[in-house]
Image (cartoon, helix red, strand yellow):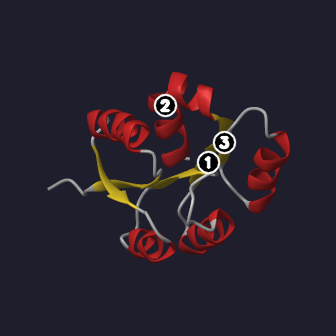
Amino acid sequence: MEAVRTILLVVPELMFQSRLREQATALGYDIVLGETDATVADGLAAAPQLAVIDLHALGIDWQAAVAAAAEAGVPVLAFGRHTEAGLLKAARDAGCARVVPRSQLVAELPSLITETADG
């Protein structure tokens, strides 16, 4: 029996979350949602292969989420607005495996998931 592959999605915007879920599911991943700091911690406890974090997620301490993911050995694919270079750099400096503008995430999601999750 094949092991379940999981992605932790920390993406509060429902329409975008749905789009990401659809593409991840097509790649064979189950989705766990992180909607609060507590559910992010619960999601990381499930040992996902990847965490996808919206750097603009309200109510989520993305820096704590990235640190917890690193401690759990879970790579992070983070994204934010292309106009906020400082925020994207801060996410890279915090230890995210990949940091991309939202437009790149949309355009390249399947390959970004595969490359980041599989290291």
Q: Residues within 10 Å of mark 3 (few under 14, many from 20)?
A: many
The picture places residue 41, in percent across and down from the top left corner, at 47, 75
Could you say which is closer to the camera, residue 86 or residue 59? Answer: 59
Work out whether 82 lies above or below 3.
above
Instruction: Name which of mark 2 and mark 3 comes first in the sequence.
Output: 3
Q: Label 1's element?
A: strand
Q: Residues within 10 Å of mark 1 (few under 14, many from 20)?
A: many
Kindly identify the amino acid type of the residue bearing the numbered disc 1: Ala
Kindly identify the amino acid type of the residue bearing the numbered disc 3: Gly
Query: For the point 25% across and 56% down, which residue is it?
Result: 4
Query: Outermost residue, top direction?
Result: 107
Instruction: Name which of mark 2 and mark 1 comes first in the sequence.
Output: 1
Q: Quadrant of residue 73?
A: bottom right
**Disc 3 + disc 1, Cβ < 8 Å:** yes
Query: For the point 40% across and 43% down, which residue is it?
Result: 17
Work out whether 21 lies above or below 12.
above
Instruction: Please give the residue where the numbered disc 3 appears in the rendered image.
Output: 80
Instruction: Please give the residue where the numbered disc 1 appears in the rendered image.
Output: 78
Q: Label 2's element?
A: helix
Query: Outermost residue, right direction?
Result: 86
Could you say which is closer to the camera, residue 106 or residue 112? Answer: 106
Instruction: Please give the residue where the numbered disc 2 appears in the rendered image.
Output: 109
Query: For the point 45% across and 45% down, which residue is it?
Result: 13
Q: Label 3's element?
A: strand
Kindly identify the amino acid type of the residue bearing the numbered disc 2: Leu
Q: Residues within 10 Å of mark 2 (few under 14, many from 20)?
A: some
User: Residue 41 shows which numbered tag?
Assistant: none
Could you say which is closer to the camera, residue 80 or residue 23? Answer: 80
Could you say which is closer to the camera, residue 113 or residue 33? Answer: 33
**Disc 2 + disc 3, Cβ < 8 Å:** no
Find the distance from the CA under tag 2 to the CA under tag 3: 14 Å
